[in-house]
Image (tube, grey):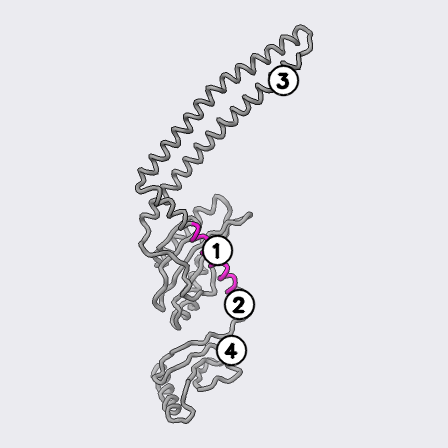
Amino acid sequence: MKKNNLLILSIVFFIFSNSAMAGKLYKWVDKNGKISFSDKVPPEESRREREELNQEGRTIAVKDAAKTPEEIQQLKKIAALQETQKDLLQSQLAKDAALLKTYRTEEDIDTLAKSKFEMLDSHISIASGQSETLRKQLILHQKAAANFERAGKAIPQKNISNIDLAQKQFNKNQQEITEFESQKLQLSQQLISDKRRFNTLKKQTGESPKIHNETIPSLLLGELSCQEKSCDPLWERAISFITKAGSKIIYRSETLILTKTPKLSKDRGLSLTRINNEQQTSIILDIRCADSKGGKETCKNEQTTQLVESFNQLAD
């Protein structure tokens, strides 16, 4: 088959090279699967993908086929996804820069957290001491009111005001203690998060993360949906999936995973995006290929289709 194609191509170029009309030559596959060559593309074939060939028969440019309404809509969805990815990346990079500027080692994180814990414990200790004093004052005013009641007398307005004020002060004190305890819990969670992110940044490659603008997208998107507790395990399975697919992760955050930019025609660049909505979370697989004829074929081939289908089964 290859020999026949080469023979046909040779004959076509012989004819065109000896013709006064010699110039650009186009190659395309018609609706019947027949390979056609001509220096002009017939109107009925103008919407098909075609290659422009040089005098040696090499492809020097590829004109994409006209997009269907469905393909146009999918491209808009992919463009919107890329904008979301850019926003997530820029936001996280700013946070990462601040984290690395603040801490040089994991011990630095522990040291700063320890000083904050000690400060909060001090506030709680002081507030707890005040709590006992305020509680005694409240009980004292309540006993005085009880004495008036036992004597069959009306409780004076001043005593009622004292009880109300003591109760408010005690409640405020208790609220302060609760807030300090809440800050300790948030600090503990932040400590874990900062350590995890710090270690992740130290392990990442030196390659600068970026959204693959110079590549072409596959029109196939993988998409998983999850809610709350099921999302973290599903996110980790999705990361494991693209790793097993042979992709090298160069950037990782809690909402975005990027792999190496595809350079060769056979390469695929994969990204995972975690988008949190009010009702559910979506985990989207985006596939990109090298901007070449071979890259376009890779983005459309059976392996890419199977990759997306397998990804969509991760939630089952």
Q: Residue beneath label 4, please? A: 47
Considering the numbered disc 2 on the image, is that residue within a helix, a strand or a loop?
A: helix
Q: Residue beneath label 3, please? A: 161
Can residue 236 be spotted in the picture? no
When asked about the image quadrant of residue 107, the answer is top left
Q: Residue drawn 55% across and 22% down?
A: 169
> Mark 4 or 3, which is nearer the eye?
3
Q: Residue beneath label 2, please? A: 72
Measuring from the top left, give residue 29's x and y in whole percent.
45, 80
Give the class, few, some or many, for how many residues have Cα within 10 Å of label 2's Cα (few <14, many ≥20).
Answer: few
Q: Which of marks 4 and 1 precedes in the sequence? A: 4
Q: Which of marks 3 and 4 precedes in the sequence? A: 4
Asked if disc 4 and disc 3 are in contact, CB closer than 8 Å, the reply is no
Considering the numbered disc 3 on the image, is that residue within a helix, a strand or a loop?
A: helix
Considering the numbered disc 1 on the image, is that residue within a helix, a strand or a loop?
A: helix
Q: Residue beneath label 1, please? A: 84
Q: Nearer the viewer, residue 110 or 62?
A: 110
Q: Nearer the viewer, residue 199 or 44?
A: 199
Measuring from the top left, give residue 58's x and y in whole percent.
36, 80
- Does the magenta segment cover residue 124? no
Q: Main secondary structure of the magenta part?
A: helix
Instruction: Give the extent of the magenta segment.
Output: 74-91
Give the class, few, some or many, for how many residues have Cα within 10 Å of label 3's Cα (few <14, many ≥20).
Answer: few
From mark 3 to mark 2, how far is it between C-alphas?
72 Å
From mark 4 to mark 3, how far is it between C-alphas?
86 Å
